[in-house]
Amino acid sequence: MLDIFIICLLALGLAWPLGHYMTGIFSGQRHFTDTLFNPVERLIYKAIGVNPNLGMTWKSYGAAFLLSNLVLGILAFLLLKFQHLLPMNPDGIGPLSWDLALHTAVSFLTNTNQQHYSGQAQLSYLSQGFLIVTLQFVTPAMALAVCVAILRGMLGGRNKRSAAEGEARDLGNYYVDLVRGVLRLLIPLATIVALLLSWQGVPSSFEGAQKVQTLDPAAPIAQQQVPIGPVAAMVSIKQLGTNGGGWYGPNSSNPLENPTPVSNAIETIALVLVPMAVVFMAGGMLRRKSFSWMSLAAMGVLSVVFIAATVYSELQPNAAFAGQAMHGPNMEGKEVRFGPELSALWGTFTTQTSNGSVNAMHDSFNPIGGLMTRSGMLISAIWGGIGCGFVNFIVYVWIAVFLSGLMIGRTPEIFGRKIETREITLLGSLIVLPTLCVLVLTAITVAIPALTGNSNPGFHGISQVFYEYTSAFANNGSGFEGLGDNTPWWNVSCVIALLLGRYLPLFIPLVIAGRMAAKRVSPVGNGSLKLESPTFCITLVAVILILNFLSFLPAAVMGPIGEALELATISVEQ
Amino acid sequence: MNATIQHPTFAQHMLTGLRAGLTLLVLCGGVYTGVVTSAGSTLFSHQATGSLLNQGERVIGSEWVAQPFVSDSYFHSRPSAVDYDPTATGGSNLAPSNPELRARVIAQSADIQRKEGVSAEQIPVDMLSTSGAGLDPHISPEAAMLQAPRVARARQLPLEQVQNLVGQAIEGPQWGLFGQHRVNVLKLNLVLDKHQVF
C-alpha cells in the first residue's frame, strides 16, 4: 500500500515543476532552453515551411489542426498497408487488411492506440518503431497545442490589447506549438524514461527474435522465441504521451515490456506525469495559480476515490476461485511482481488519463474494478489525455459556470466573458455526443450476435462491447481484451467512435474559446462567481458526476453492477 | 497588429501538413528511435537483447519469460493462457462470472492437490490464475514453498535443503519499496540444477 502513496506523491512532485516548464515554453517569452533548441527549431520551421512569428485565428488554427491530421492519417494508412514492401522487417511480416490498416492508422492518429492487431506479431519494425512512435509523439503534442490555444483564447488571445471588440483573436501558431511540444517536452522526457527502462531490462535492439532452448527436457515445447526490438524507445513514449499502444500484445503486463516493480513505478509515474503537469501549466498560462489548485482539488478527489474503490475491488477474491484455493486477492490476469494493488492503481490511472496501457487484464477485474475503469474513461477529465483531458475539464467548468450563474441569478461569465446561447448550444452537443455514440454503437453490436464476438457470457458480455466503444470514444485504447475485435464491423464501427471522440471534443471547445475571446470583458465585481472557491469546486464535481450518472447509469446496471449482484447471489448459494 | 496573423488557404494547409508530417517522421521515428535504441543497447547490452540466461554454453531462456515445467524435479510456473509462447503472449481474459473460468480453476486445483498432496485451502491463488501476459516469470514465496516437498522427493534431497534454496531465491519488494515478494522460477530451477546435476 505504501508504494501506491510513493508513486502518487512522486508523480505530483514531478508534475509541478514540469507544469512550470511547460508554461515557459508555450508563453512565447525568452526561455532558458532557447540556446539549445532555437537552432533546431529554425531548421524544422524551414523544413515545414512556416513562419513562426505569424499567429492564427481560431479558424486557421482549427483548420491547421484538422488538415494536418488528415494528411498524417493518409500517410499512416499507406505505410501500414504496404509494410511488407518496405524495409526494416526482419521477421517477414505481411500486410494488414484494409479495415485493420484503417483502424490502426486512425487509432494511433487519435492518440487512442486501441489495438485490434496483435503487437509484435503483425507489425514490422518500421511500422512500430518509425510510424507508430512518431504518432505517439505527434498526437499528444497536437492536442496539447489545441489546449494551449484554448487557454490563450480564454484570456482574449495574444492580440487582446490591440484588437477591437468582436475582432478575431490571435490564438498562437499551431505549428510552433506542435513542434515545441514534441521537441522541448516529449523528446527529452521520453529519452530519460527510455534509458531508465532499458536499465531495468526492457529490450532495446534492432535484432530479430532470440531463440532459446527450454530447461525442462520433458516440457511440451523445446524452444522459445523471445521477441525483442526497439522496445524501450516505444514504451517510454507510449506511457508519457497518454498513448498506451504497447510493443507486445498484452502491453505492460508483459514482463519484457515491464520487467520489475521499479520499471512499473517509472511507467506508472510517466503515465500521469504530463496530464498532471498540464493542470499546473494551465494556471501559469491563465496567470491564475489558484485555478490550478481548484482543478487539482476537483480531479484529485475523484482520482483518489476511484483508486480506492479499484484497489478494494481487486483485493477481494475472484468469485471463480471460491473453495478451490487459499483466501486471496483476484490474481487472474495479474502479475506476481505487481500484485493486486499496483495493478489497480495502474488500471485507474490509465483509464482516467486516456492512456490505455495496462499492466493487468481489465477483462478479468472484479466487477467494481471494471466499473471504475470504464467510469474513468467516460468522464475523461480526471487528468485526462494530454491536452484533450484538460479541454474536457474546461468544458465541465463552462457547464458548471452556466449552472451556477442560473442558480445565483446572474449572467454566467468566466474571466469576465459571457457564456451565451450559441456557446451553450455547442456545449450541449458535447454532452449528448458520448451518450449517442457509445450507446447507439453498443446497442447495434449487442443486438446482432454475429457481430459481437465476445468471450464472456451474460452481463459481462455486454460490458465487453460497451467497454470497447467507450475506450474508442474516450481515445483510451485499453480493452476487455477477450473480444474478437479484428473484424470489418469492429474495425469500421470503432473508427467512427474514434473520430467522433477525438475531433469534436477538441474542435468545438476551440470554437467556443475563439468566440469568447472576442467578447467584451466586463469588470469583475463583488457579485461575480468565484471560480477558485470550495463551493464552485464542489459544484463542478457534482456536475461531472451527475452528467455521467444520467448518461450511463442504466448501461452500468446492465453491465458491472448486474454482474456484481449476480456473483453475490452465487456465493450466497454456495 | 493584424499583419501578424496569417490566413492560409486549403492547399497551403495541406502542403504544410504534409511537410510537417514528413519532418516529424524523420525526427521522432528516425532520430529519436535510432539514437535512444543505440544508446540503450550500448549502455545495457545484457538487458537490450532480452536478459538471456545461460547454462554452460546453452542459452536457456530469458530471465523475464516463464517456461513450462512439468517434471517433478523442477518448480512449476504459474499456468499460462498461451502455453508459454512468447510470440502469442496474452491473458485468459475470462471474467470472474465466466463458468469457463470456474471449470478451469476446479480442474487445476484438483490437479495441484493430487500432485503436491495438499488440500484446496493450502493453494495460493497465483498457482491457479493465469497472468496478464501468460509469461509471468515469478511465483509467490508460498507457491514455491508448497512445491518444495515434491521437488525434494524427486531429487532425493533433504526437504530442509530445498527450502533453504527457496528461501535464498525469495526477492523482497525492490529497493524495499516497490512490488511483492516473489521467486523467479527459472532462476531457482537453474540454481537447483547447479546444486545437483540431474
Image (spheres, rainbow, N blue to C red):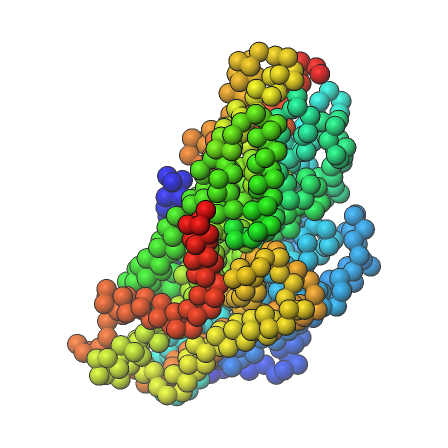
Point out residue A214 in the picture as x, y percentages from the top left corner. Answer: 73, 30
In the picture, measured across the screen, residue A78 lies left or right of residue A383, that is right
Q: Is residue A118 above or below residue A401?
A: above
Q: In this view, does B1 lie above or below A453?
A: below
What residue is at 70 percent from the left and 47 percent from the top?
B88
Front residue of this view, candidates B38 and B178: B178
Outermost residue toward the left in this view: A526
**Among the 4 quarters of the image, the one containing residue A128:** bottom right
Front residue of this view, candidates B11 and B141: B141
Residue B151 visible to the viewer:
yes
Point out residue A336 in the picture as x, y percentages from the top left corner. Answer: 52, 37
Front residue of this view, candidates A38 and A483: A483
| Quadrant position of the N terminus of chain A in the picture | top left
What residue is at 80 percent from the left and 57 percent from the top?
A94
What residue is at 45 percent from the left and 81 percent from the top?
A429
What residue is at 74 percent from the left and 39 percent from the top?
A225
Front residue of this view, candidates A548 and A574: A574
In the picture, measured across the screen, residue A468 lies left or right of residue B2, that is right
Point out residue A274 in the picture as x, y percentages from the top left corner. Answer: 46, 56
Point out residue B108 in the picture as x, y percentages from the top left corner. Answer: 60, 38
